[in-house]
Image (spheres, rainbow, N blue to C red):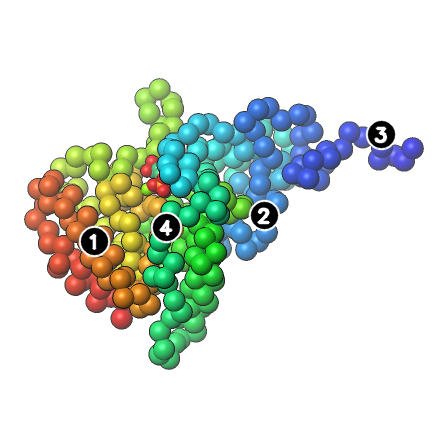
Amino acid sequence: MSALDAFDLPTSPLAPASPLAPVSPLAPGTRWSTWPSVAKGQRGPQPHPDWIVTAVAALDTELGVLKTGKEADVHLVERAIPAGAVTPPGGARWSLLAAKRYRGAEHRQFTRDDAYSEGRRVRRSRDQRAADDRRSAYGRSVRAGHWAQVEFDALCALWEAGAPVPYPVQIDGTEILLEFVGTQDDDGAWVAAPRLAQVRPDRDLLAVYFEQARDAMGVFARLGWAHGDLSPYNVLAHGERLVVIDVPQVVDLAASPFATQFLHRDCVNLCSWFTARGLDVDADALFADVYAQAW
Ligand SMILES: Nc1ncnc2c1ncn2[C@@H]1O[C@H](COP(=O)(O)OP(=O)(O)O)[C@@H](O)[C@H]1O
Ligand SMILES: [Mg+2]
C-alpha cells in the first residue's frame, strides 16, 4: 500500500486536485466550481473583474430558478468558498451568477442562420481584423446552432466594446454563467432586476434610460451588429442603469439584407415603450442615429 492510498483523495473528475479543497460529499444542488475546469478560452474577457471567484475550493450552489423559457432556463447560482476552507490569501470569496442553460444544440428555434456571412471587403485595421476573427468564429457557431457559444462570444465582444451587458464569466457546454444583475429585497432574498417592461420611471429617469438605450445600440452598431431581439423584455432596469441581455440572435448589419429590418424593429420596439411612458421619441430618428454609427 502506497502512502497515497491512506488518504481519501477526491476521485470525481470534477473534484479539484488541490489538497486545500474540501473532500466532504457535496450537498444536493451543489457542485465544485466549474471555473478551474473550463479552458482559458471559455472564460470571459481579461482582465477578470475582481469579484470573480477563481479558487479551486469554491462551490457552486443552486439558489433557484430566475426564469424558464423556450430555448433556455436561467438559474441563480452562488459561487463561494465555503466557510472554514483554507485558501491562499486574496481573491474574491463569494459571488452571485446567473446560469443560462440552453436546452441543447439540437433545439433550434432561430431561423436567422442566413442573416450572417463573412465581413466587409474593405481595408481593416488590426482591431477591426480582430473583430472580424471573432465574427468568423461567431458565424461558425451560428451555423452549427451552438447558441450558448454564440451568445457567450457576442457578450464577450460587447463587454470589451463597453456595452452595458452582464459580464460573461464562462461557458461550459450549453451553460453560460453571467454576472447576476439584481438586488436583495427587504427579506434578504436575491431578486433579478426588473425588466424595463415592468418599471414606471419618472420623466427624468425615462430620459436617462433612453440615452443609455441609444448609447447601447450605438456600441452594437459600431461592432457592426444589431441586437435583433431588443425589447423592454430584454433590457433590465438595474436602479438607474439599463443592462441589455439575451443576445444570441445578434445580426451583422453588413452581411445581411434583412439586418436593417431587424435594427429598425429594435428601434420601434424600444421607442414604443418610451412613447407609451410619455417620452417623445421617434423610432426613425433613433434608427438613423444608430445606423450611421455602423460605418
Ligand atoms: N445576468 C442576469 N442577471 C439577472 N437576471 C437575468 C440575467 N440574465 C437573465 N436573467 C433573467 O432571466 C430572464 C430570461 O433571460 P433571457 O436572456 O432574456 O433569456 P430568454 O431567451 O429566455 O428570454 C430575464 O428576463 C431575467 O429575468
Ligand atoms: Mg429574453
Q: Which amino acid does label 4 sit on?
A: Phe
Q: What residue type is labelled 1?
A: Arg
Label whose residue precedes the other's in the sequence (2 or 4): 2
Q: Are marks 1 and 4 in contact (CB under 8 Å)?
A: no
The N terminus lies in quadrant:
top right
Q: Which residue is drawn at 35% across and 53% down?
A: 111
- Per the image, the residue denoted by label 1 is 265
Label whose residue precedes the other's in the sequence (1 or 4): 4
Give above or below for 142 relative to 107. Answer: below
Q: Cα distance, mark 1 to mark 4? A: 17 Å
Label whose residue precedes the other's in the sequence (3 or 2): 3
Q: What residue type is labelled 3?
A: Ala
* Residue nearer the viewer, 188 or 284: 284
Q: Do the residues labelled 1 and 3 touch (CB within 8 Å)?
A: no
Helix, strand or loop under label 3: helix
- Residue 164 placement, left or right of 196: right
**Front disc: 1 or 3:** 1
**Front disc: 2 or 4:** 4
Helix, strand or loop under label 1: helix
- Per the image, the residue denoted by label 2 is 38
Q: In which quarter of the image is ligand 2?
A: top left
Give above or below for 58 relative to 229. Answer: above
Label whose residue precedes the other's in the sequence (4 or 3): 3
- Residue 263 placement, left or right of 120: left
Label whose residue precedes the other's in the sequence (2 or 1): 2
Label whose residue precedes the other's in the sequence (1 or 3): 3
Helix, strand or loop under label 2: loop
Q: Residue at x 41, y 39 (%)?
A: 72
